[in-house]
Image (tube, rainbow, N blue to C red):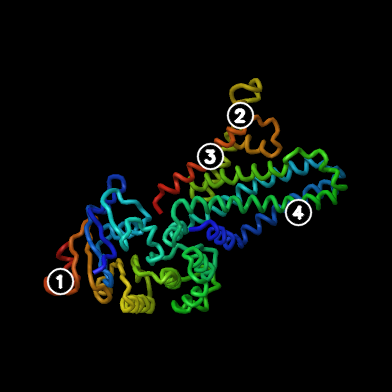
Amino acid sequence: MQEIIRTNQLTKRYGSQLALDGLDFTLIKGQVLGVIGPNGSGKTTLFSVLLGLRKATSGNFSVLGSENPEQVRNQTGVILDQGNFYRNISARNNLTISAMTKGVNLDRVDALLETVGLGQAGNKKFKNFSYGMKKRLEVADALLGEPEFIIMDEPTNGLDPEGILFIRDLIFRLKEGGKTIMLSSHYLDEVEKVCTDFLILKNGKKIFQGNKADVKDNFESLESVFTTKL
Amino acid sequence: MSLAQMLKIELFKIKRFDFYLFAGLYLFLIVAIPIGINAVFKQVLDGSNTLGFMHSVSIKLMLFGVIVAQAREYSNDVNRKKILNGYNRDDLFIAQLIIVGIYTLTILLLSLLAMPAIALALGGFSIYAQTPSFWILGLVLSNLSWGVFATFLINIFKRPLWAVLAFLGYVFIEFIFKILGQFQEEKHGWNLLIYFSPMELFNRLNTFENLTLGLLLTIVGYVLVFQLVSLFILKRRDF
């Protein structure tokens, strides 16, 4: 079983505040891991550290076998909250810049815009996009390099039912394609539908990690794990 | 990322309204104002006045143009996206230098384009007879230094408004020093501070006037400090 992520006593401190507290966990190839926890539990900080956006205070980790996330960028896709694109540039040009950065064939830009349902909105400036459209563009950007491993931070947050179905369908398709996914969400029922494994955090600490069977054997539902453990 | 890849990306991004405004405004000001003064006031400007004006306009537009261009990378956390897509922190620094290079090259090309036009309008190329040696080199070095300073400001303040306000604050302090200096002998106290201020020295690069080796080394020192602080910030900042 190939390890996609391994953390060892991973700790991140912001001044006196401990955001990650000696976190140990592994993510295996093909898993869809749902990271859940209340606000401030360390989910976004964990993603930021794993992506190399923030430096860990202590401990270590590896992503796709590398201790330096910068070395595995082209195998990693990221879907963040709203997409950090140039506001005054069109969706197509924003995606073109990403493709040039990743060294991806520019033909993929239009194909991916079609895939995420933005084919007609390619020339529209990013700042004029609705929340759902921004999220779809972020998905297109994440898939540009055909990554092995995808991180999704609150992928369905603020989306309408159509948007939620789109993301759910996307996760199923990626899973069928053998991709490994790590996502965070506050919607427990949604996480339960799409994830194979779960990691529950509280105050930066791991309080539960297991798969669907572990949840079924020991608890009534994911919600009851959440309420019992927190 | 390779340098060629980064250059290609920056050239792709440059095709924007604010860049066209920067280039168009520069060309308009350096051509229209000397010709306008000549036509309205019947006062023929000589070559060094015209080129001095060109330099003065270029550095101001350079400062604001580069601040706007570099600030765009900080808006909406674009730098975060760049890191996620494959830039490392050194690449962010190099990309900033490329932007400064592109703006400086634009200033140079537009100046070279404007010089014959101005000469033809003001009575021939003889107006440039008194032009200081290495004027073109001076224009390039001066603008590069100002571009580095603008980049330094935006790396510290991230937002264009704050960077511009910090610059205006600096100009105000320099103005106060100049007033205080009027009550002193030339090479003492406040006058000496003004004499060694980075902006004053960067401007002198234009004509290399009274630039000793020591002062040149001071300028190199300032540029290095601005660059190293920028690099340090980019390496340490959480995105």
Expressed as whole percent of the image width and height from the top left, the position of residue A75 reads 38, 66
Which residue type carries mark 2?
Gly
Q: Quadrant of the C terminus of chain A?
A: bottom left
Vertical position of residue B65 compared to residue B200: above or below: below
The residue under label 1 is A214
- Labelled disc at residue B224: 3
Q: Are marks 3 and 1 on the same chain?
A: no
Amino acid on which the number 1 mark rests in the picture: Asp
The CA distance from mark 4 to mark 2 is 34 Å
Q: Earlier in the sequence, mark 2 or mark 3?
A: 2
Residue of label 4: B113
Return the chain for callout 3.
B
Secondary structure of residue under mark 3: helix
Q: Residue at x 29, y 65 (%)?
A: A4
Instruction: Kindly state the secondary structure of the residue where label 4 is placed.
Output: helix
> CA–CA distance between discs 2 and 3?
15 Å
Q: Residue at x 75, y 43 (%)?
A: B51
Task: Count every numbered label the image shows and give the total.
Answer: 4
Residue A230, placed above or below residue B166: below
User: Quick one: which residue is furthest to the top in this view?
Assistant: B185
**In the rendered structure, which amino acid carries the disc numbered 3?**
Leu
Give amino acid for label 4. Leu
Same chain check for tags 1 and 2: no
Q: Could you tell me how far apart the alpha carbons at marks 3 and 1 are, in whole angstroms?
A: 58 Å
Chain under numbered label 1: A
Mark 2 surroundings: few (<14), some (14-19) or many (≥20) residues within 10 A: few
Q: Which residue is mark 2?
A: B214
Drawn side of residue A141 relative to residue B99, left or right: left
